[in-house]
Structure formats: C-alpha cells, structure tokens
Amino acid sequence: MGSKCPAKFQNLDFCAPSTHDNPYEMYDYFLEHEPLYFDEKNEVWEVFRYDDIVRIERDTETFINGEGCRPNIPADPGMIYQDGEQHNKQRALVSSGFTPRQMRKMEDRAREIVTELVDNMLATSGEVDIVADLATALPMRLIADMLDIPQEKRSAVQSWMNTAIQGGQGPDYVTDEVNDAFSAFVMHHEEMHAARLEAGCTGSDILTIWMNAEINGEKLDESELLFEHILLNTGGAETTRNAIAGGLEQLSNDPKQYDALYENPDLIPNAVEEIIRWVCPFINMYRTATRDYELHGKVIKAGQQVGLTYPAANRDPRHFSDPHTFNIFRDFSKDSKHLSFGLGPHFCLGASLARLEVRLSLEEMTRRVKSIRIPEGKEVEYISSSFTRGLTKFPAILESR
C-alpha cells in the first residue's frame, strides 16, 4: 500500500463525471499505490494496471459481461452484453456489416467526406471548430450513410445519441432526458426496420445486412437488432470523434510532430495508434465476477463489478516509456499495444473503422493545412463524464499550405 492515501483520493465516486476531469494525477496514484480500489458509494471495484486489465479481459469464465458493462446498470440484448457462444453468434452476425468489401466501400466514402469537410473549413476565412466541423461530422455522416438514415433525421439521431450515452455513467445519470432520447431512438429504429421489411430487405445498408444475416438458420432478433443499431451509433461516433479532435489538439501544440506527418506520411499509421492510446475515448468498461477472486491482497466477491480503467492502463509506466508524453514516433514494438479498444473476445468490432477515419483525417489535414492555431483568448473544452473522454469544443484558425 505504501504511504497513507492522500485525502483527495479517498472516498472517490467513480461514477461522478468530475472524478475524471484532469484525472492523470489520480490514475498515477492508484497505478502505484492502490491498483485495486473499492468505490464504496457505487459498490464497484476499479482496476488501473495494464496487466490486471489484460488478465481480467482474458479470464472470461471468472469475469463476464452478461450482468452489464456499465456500473450498476443491467445488461441489454446487445452483443457487448453477451458471453460465450451467444456472444460469438451475435458478433459473427454483426460482423457481416464489416466485411473487407464493406470496409473498402466505407474507406472510399470516408475519404470523400473528409475531403469535403476540410474544403469547407479552409473556405472559412475566420475561426472553425474542429470538433463540430470535422471530428463530429465525419463519423456521424459515415454512420448515417452506412445506415441510410434520411438526411432530415440525421441531426436528431446525433442529438438523441449524445444524450442517451450520458446514462452509461450509472443509475443516477439515467435522467428523464436520457430516457426520452432513448425512446425517440427506439421509434426511429422501428420506422427504419419497418421500411426495410416493406422494401423486401433488398437494400445494401448495414441495417438491412444485419436483418438478412444468418448463421445456421439463426438471425438477430428484433431486440438484438435494436441494440446493435444503438451500439453502432454511440460507439462508432464517440471513439472516432474523440480521437480525431484530441489527436489534432496534441499535434497543434507540437508543430514539429505535425510537420513530421506532412514530411513523412508513412508515420501516420503509428501516429494513429499514439493518438488512440493518448486520448483513450472510453474511460472504462465493467465486468462481473462469477466467483471470489483475489487480487493485490483484496477479494473481489462473486457478483461484484470491476471497472477496467483504460486511460490509466494506457499510461502505465510498466508498459509505456515516458507515458505522459505524446509521441507519434513511439516504438510500439518495445512499448505495449494500447488497450483503448479492449482485448479478447470483446475487442471493439469497429476498431478498424475508427483507425481508418483517424488516418484519413490526419492525411488530409497534414497535406492541406500548414498550421492549426487556437485563437487568442479561446481554449478547448472537454466533456465532463465518467464514461467517455473527449473535446466538446476546439476553436481553431487554419492556415492552408
């Protein structure tokens, strides 16, 4: 345990958004001195070290998703909340929307969207907001195209998802607004589902692909379809938006690294990995213990939840040299792979799509934009959340090449 825990790190509420505002001093404390912490208010455990998260993610007999991945919130029928054979079946069906052929189509479309968004920003003589004008717009438009959402409904869907995801912080955050947003999305899903049935399920959008997908005669049922649809809209948008905005913010602070990507675009794939390590768009996912489990001299009891704190693990000095330095040249053959997409059977299915969108954004921005400058008197703003981490505003003046 080492020295007595500082007062500011005692009795923490890990579901409170403010706990994760500028959290790295706190994470460092727990990484070194208390790698397994019991949050008494929420009656959940939190783990921080890279090796512990890997061990828990891989031990799918002891630590399961089926009791819920969010703190004290019951599971839903979606793939992410399944274990064993049921998870494998649902994941295989959902994967039908992410085949290499589908990914090639998405890459072509994503490149068109990125080019258009950068065009629009460079056509603006004054200030732009990189969050709204690029980081949010790219995944939102790409997912909306993948799902063939009518143009007039796209901003509403985005708004519902931004509100609904706040409920993932815990039961205290499932407000009337969260429930209303969820209900509105359910109605939207049912309309889309009915329209595809009426059209004979002949389209090429991802919802139709999922409706048609079957393995050994089994298909996704209606509730599974709904929750995969929700997961694509939330997970797909959040990861990419936060990574693009956070990565460009770091690069704007370090023009040498930004210029290096222009001078040598071959560095971009490595920069993508460093951005996703550094930003770590999701703060945590939870698992439930099926038996008593001892770790660091404490016992996680059967039925208790354990929060896997990915941003702490991504800066664990046992696995990353100089972990608090953003470094696009980082040697991931010596350092470990980041855990931002999870690990094991629940590794993020959309990881390749997120990497693609971050890569294309970096390619287009570094090729066409000479510098990104935050205007005098302005600053970036972060979301306050115990579930997701990212920028909500990034005011910028762009200088074209």
Image (cartoon, helix red, strand yellow):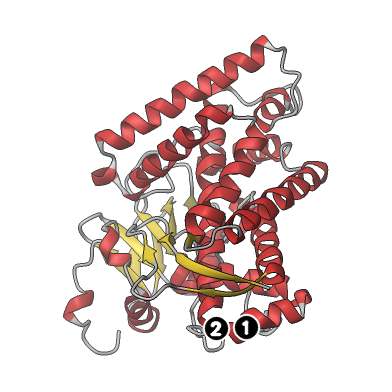
What distance separates the C-alpha of mark 2 from that of mark 1? 6 Å
**Among the 4 quarters of the image, the one containing residue 308:** bottom left
**Among the 4 quarters of the image, the one containing residue 177:** top left
Where does residue 380 sit, x and y in percent of width and height? 39, 68
Out of 180 and 32, give the one closest to the viewer.
180
Q: Which residue is mark 1?
A: 257
Where does residue 27 sit, x and y in percent of width and height? 37, 76
Which amino acid, mark 1? Gln
Where does residue 40 sit, x and y in percent of width and height? 21, 60
Label 1 sits on a secondary structure element that is helix
Label 2 sits on a secondary structure element that is loop
- In this view, 14 is above or below 232: below
- In this view, 380 is above or below 137: below
Q: Which residue is mark 2?
A: 254
Out of 160 and 378, give the one closest to the viewer.
378
Which image quarter is the C terminus in? bottom right
Q: Residue at x 70, y 63 (%)?
A: 364
**Among the 4 quarters of the image, the one containing residue 386:** bottom left
Which amino acid, mark 2? Asp
Q: Residue at x 49, y 78 (%)?
A: 315
- The answer to whether any part of residue 58 appears in the image is yes
Which image quarter is the N terminus in? bottom left
Dot 2 and dot 1 residues touching (CB under 8 Å): yes
